Image (cartoon, rainbow, N blue to C red):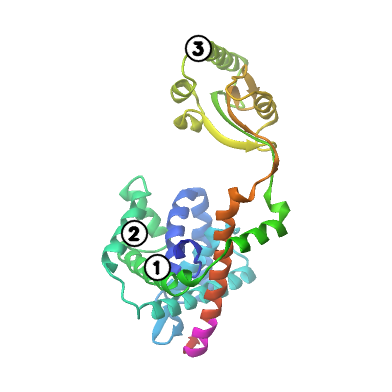
Amino acid sequence: MISAKKIFSYSLAALVLITIQTWSAFGDEQKAPQTEQKSAQTTEKKSAPTDPIAKVNDTIITRLDLDRAVKVLVSQNRLPQPLPPESLKQAEEAALDQLISAELLYQAGQKTEIKDLDKQVDEKVSQNKAKFPSAEEFEKALKSVEMTEKDLKEFTRKDVVISNFIEKNIAEKTKVTEADAKKFYDDNPDKFKQEPSVKASHILCGVEASATAEEKKKAKEKAEALLKKIKAGEDFATLAKSESTCPSSKQGGDLGFFSKGQMVAPFEKAAFALKPGEVSDVVETQFGYHIIKLTEKKEGGTIKFDEVKEKIENYLKNLKIQKAIGEYLVELKGKAKIEKL
């Protein structure tokens, strides 16, 4: 069964969790402009974080809630910062609509009892903490969206309640048949064309673009020495882990599958010329000197229905669930008292 959390975009708690993880990965270069944007917003609005922006039945949505939600949209869509006034206005309108929708679903979801709710919340918070290399990085990420761990717990609680509500009341009732999936497959042949691709590993003896002729010579000599070891029977993956300067060294040099146009020309030409199990000569690119081992080759053509049936069914179910959520929200908004202050 498809998870409601995976397909549900209205839940602010889920959005905030995504933002905390994404924002911390941007680095200082990306964070600086965001600070500038925040200052611009504050100057223009001249409102305090606790100022009410909207009211959904008896629940207040504050300026801080809206600022967080705008930050989510900005980070998710990698928008240029600071946002122009018109774009900022549009982002605020979209974010406020999400906040109102999330609150309505949360209020509806509270009517359904959830066993071990506190335990589920604690587990989800712990899982998110574990995605950070240290407690300091986790705290830094929280601060980037002006949250405390207590706030995160509350947002996570809302997320669990909303996800549970959608799962029980919408997702479980949404069905997609194999016939539905086959019709989509037959009606959309272009979506299932597959370009020829290869799976390869490599060992890189990297050189900087500014490297001297002597430095390039040493890197090439190292690559040639490694190639001799491979031809003598030493394990490719083991050598990649210990000698390659590419981040793929952690996976024994494995680059996964790639099609034409995804790698630089000399690397691509050498890789596609190999047969599975073969190892290339030393290949020079702007990144340095590579030794390539071809693992697997896939010919181009149309992907068989059986290979994509499950993905199509999930996709179609996703669409149906999103549509049902939208229709249910229209119903909730018609019955609720919503004020934009």
Helix, strand or loop status at disc 1: helix
- Position of residue 259 relative to residue 295, above or below, is below
Q: Residue 262: horizontal and vertical position, in percent?
A: 66, 38
Q: Farthest residue in the front direction?
A: 179
Circles 3 and 1: CB atoms closer than 8 Å: no
Circles 1 and 2: CB atoms closer than 8 Å: yes
Name the residue tied to disc 2: 124
Question: Residue 221 falls in which quadrant of the image?
Answer: top right
Instruction: Depth check: give the residue in front, 285 or 269.
Output: 269
Q: Residues within 10 Å of mark 1 (few under 14, many from 20)?
A: many
Instruction: Depth check: give the residue in front, 292 or 49.
Output: 292
In-image side of 246 versus 20 (left or right): right
Q: Amino acid at mark 1?
A: Asp
Name the residue tied to disc 3: 229
| Mark positioned earlier in the residue sequence (3 or 1) | 1
Q: Residue 81: horizontal and vertical position, in percent?
A: 58, 59
Instruction: Depth check: give the residue in front, 296 or 334.
Output: 296
Q: Amino acid at mark 2?
A: Lys
Q: Calculate the distance from the C-alpha at mark 1 to the C-alpha at mark 2.
A: 10 Å
Q: Residue 293: horizontal and vertical position, in percent?
A: 57, 24
Q: Amino acid at mark 3?
A: Lys
Q: Residue 119: horizontal and vertical position, in percent?
A: 26, 63
Residue appearing at x 38%, y 58% in the figure: 142
Q: Is residue 98 magenta?
A: no
| Mark positioned earlier in the residue sequence (2 or 3) | 2
For the magenta stretch, what is the residue range?
330-336
Q: Is residue 333 magenta?
A: yes
Q: Calculate the distance from the C-alpha at mark 3 to the C-alpha at mark 1.
A: 54 Å
- Residue 159: give its label: 1
